[in-house]
Image: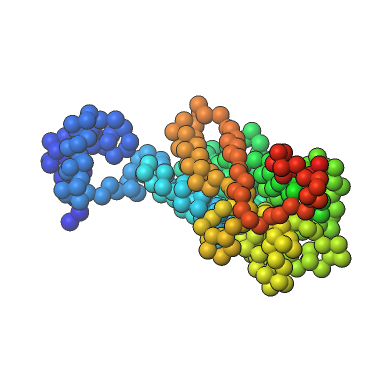
Amino acid sequence: MAATLKDLSRETGLGLATLSKYFNGGTVREKNRLAIEAAVKKLHYVPNEVARSLKTQQTHAIGVVIPELSNTFITSIISSMEDILRKRDYAVIVCDCRSDPKREKEAVEFLLHRRVDGLINMATDPTGAHLKAAMNDGIPILLVDRLVENLRGKVSAVIIDNAHAAGQAVRKLTGLGHRKIGLILGSPNLYTTNQRLTGYLNALTEAGITPADEYIRYGDYTMDGGYQAVQELLKLKDRPSALFVTNFEMTLGAMLALQHQNIRVPEDLSVIGFDKLELFGEIFPDLTLIRQPQLSIGREAANLMLDLLTSREAVPHRIVTLTTELAEGKSVRSVCDQSNFDTKEYGQCL
């Protein structure tokens, strides 16, 4: 028979009130804490989470709604978040909506029915309508990676500076003399897509280059999308001399398409990809990449959610913005006239 709270009381000599306080997250004397933990181990005591949730009105569960569970960038963030939340006794329930707004709304409803204490969302629906019920119920909501403009000031978020990230890549290429730069974006109308497009356009304008729509393609953040986008760009009469791909899966697809077309990188085409993950080194070593801080995103998201859960009234909604870095590789080359190239200015054509 499973050990009960009364068994713990007899083993430790402590009252039920003290034991209840400990298991509900309260502070007890150090000697009492040690006695309780020793007794829990000895008796193999497992708290009745259902009973505790009924009493405290907390399930110690966090719902996470994501667009694609197969996306490596997303899973790395979830792993980082889960490590921290689990240490604080929170379970994580992950729902994959497959980038479908209808499924996303259903996932949020499912989690609300399970009475999750908080909700973390990498939004597919750019309107934020799927989160209305959670907001009305006062559930702490945290957006990750993607802002929802309609919800600014109403929910918290952890994002990267997407415009700056794209600008880093494009400035690297324009500094090496490239003027025809292809861009492969994710799904239209998403926050990350729009911000990365803005960074690309701004960097071209700074370099005195008029952006050309024919060099911009959308790949839906999938490997197949990246593959197809490259095929389209290679069919152009005036092909780009460089390519910037804005996520991990699309970068893999783009590189496979270039291999299948016998396009040499960087001899025939310079390439900058996104997200420095271990898999790249195994398949396509020495890629120049914009590196997102996946682990930091996960840690910031978990800690911010814990703040929202423990101090709902005191913590104002805020946006945490993290930066990216350019990881130098060997997939880009200069197309400058070497007689007109200033090595002192970090690869800037004069």
Colour scheme employed for the rendering of this structure: rainbow
Horizontal and vertical percent position of residue 188: 74, 54
Horizontal and vertical percent position of residue 159: 60, 42
**Can residue 165 be seen here?**
yes
Horizontal and vertical percent position of residue 285: 57, 60
- Comparing 301 with 182, the one in front is 182
**Can residue 220 be seen here?**
no
Q: Relative to 238, does residue 294 appear above or below in the rendering?
A: above
- Comparing 222 with 108, the one in front is 222
Residue that sits furthest to the top in the current view: 314
Horizontal and vertical percent position of residue 282: 53, 63
Q: Relative to 298, does residue 94 appear above or below in the rendering?
A: below
The residue shown at (59%, 52%) is: 275
Is residue 287 shown left or right of residue 26? Answer: right
> Quadrant location of the N terminus?
bottom left
Q: Could you tell me how many numbered marks the image carries?
A: 0
Is residue 62 shown left or right of residue 147? Answer: left
Q: Relative to 251, does residue 207 appear above or below in the rendering?
A: above
Q: Relative to 64, does residue 138 appear above or below in the rendering?
A: above
> Quadrant location of the C terminus?
top right
The residue shown at (72%, 68%) is: 263
The residue shown at (53%, 48%) is: 294
- Comparing 337 with 126, the one in front is 337
The residue shown at (77%, 45%) is: 341
Residue that sits furthest to the front in the current view: 339
